[in-house]
Amino acid sequence: MKWTRAVHHLAELAEKCGELPTTFFRFQVVGLWVFGELLDVPKDLETIEVALVTDLPVDEVPWCTEPVGAEHWANSTRLSRNPFSAQWRSKDAPVWNHRIERPALIWSAEDGINEEALVAVGDGTAELVRIPAPSPEELRKRVEDELAVSLKALRAANQDYTDHRWSPGKLTPYSDALWRTTTGYLDLLDVVN
């Protein structure tokens, strides 16, 4: 997709974040951050990488997973119909990690759309609005913290799958949750090792 189209999609998502009713979902998105190639120099992109910060506790949003209701939220905001790659995060932990490097805040529930950041992304000058990089020690600690949360979530997802394996009804929600949780855990384990 063209750079200008990607910025347009990002701006639309920021607007949708501010328009959704607060009582419609099990959780609230309180921040929209962009990271990855859209923070580089203008060029054609495959996807727009975003981090969606929720009001959920850390244990309910392990790395690479989706909170309950995320699919409904994604459909309501057209996130699922546009070329986004979304990572769900908790407000109770830093948005950044080993993959979300120096993101830029585009929208927050507190302040609305960050026009300065949107303009900088569109102009290819996002370097001016990105957060500073963590120190190697801060990054190591962040990955270790996420790995501990991820392991706990992996055990819970495995148990949910086991409990529902032979029960009537669809197994897909449990298998998908187990797959996402496993993917996140293995990604973090590779970084630690």
Image (spheres, rainbow, N blue to C red):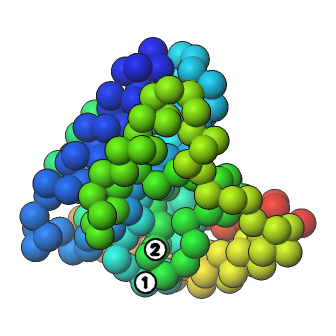
Cβ–Cβ under 8 Å for marks 1 and 2: yes
Q: Nearer the viewer, residue 110 or 20?
A: 110
- Please, is residue 16 above or below residue 185 in the view? above
Q: Amino acid at mark 1?
A: Pro
- Please, is residue 7 above or below residue 27 in the view? above
Kindly state the secondary structure of the residue where label 2 is placed: strand
Q: Earlier in the sequence, mark 1 or mark 2?
A: 1
For image coordinates 82% across by 68% down, the residue present is 135
Q: Nearer the viewer, residue 173 or 121?
A: 121
Horizontal and vertical percent position of residue 33: 46, 53
Q: Nearer the viewer, residue 137 or 192?
A: 137
Snapshot quadrant of residue 72: bottom left
Bin the neighbour count of mark 2 within 10 Å (Cα to Cα): few under 14, some 14-19, many 20 and up: many
Snapshot quadrant of residue 172: bottom left
Q: Nearer the viewer, residue 75 or 107?
A: 107
For image coordinates 73% across by 59% down, the residue present is 133
Q: Amino acid at mark 2?
A: Ser
Kindly state the secondary structure of the residue where label 1 is placed: loop
- The residue carrying mark 2 is 90
For image coordinates 22% across by 46% down, the residue present is 15
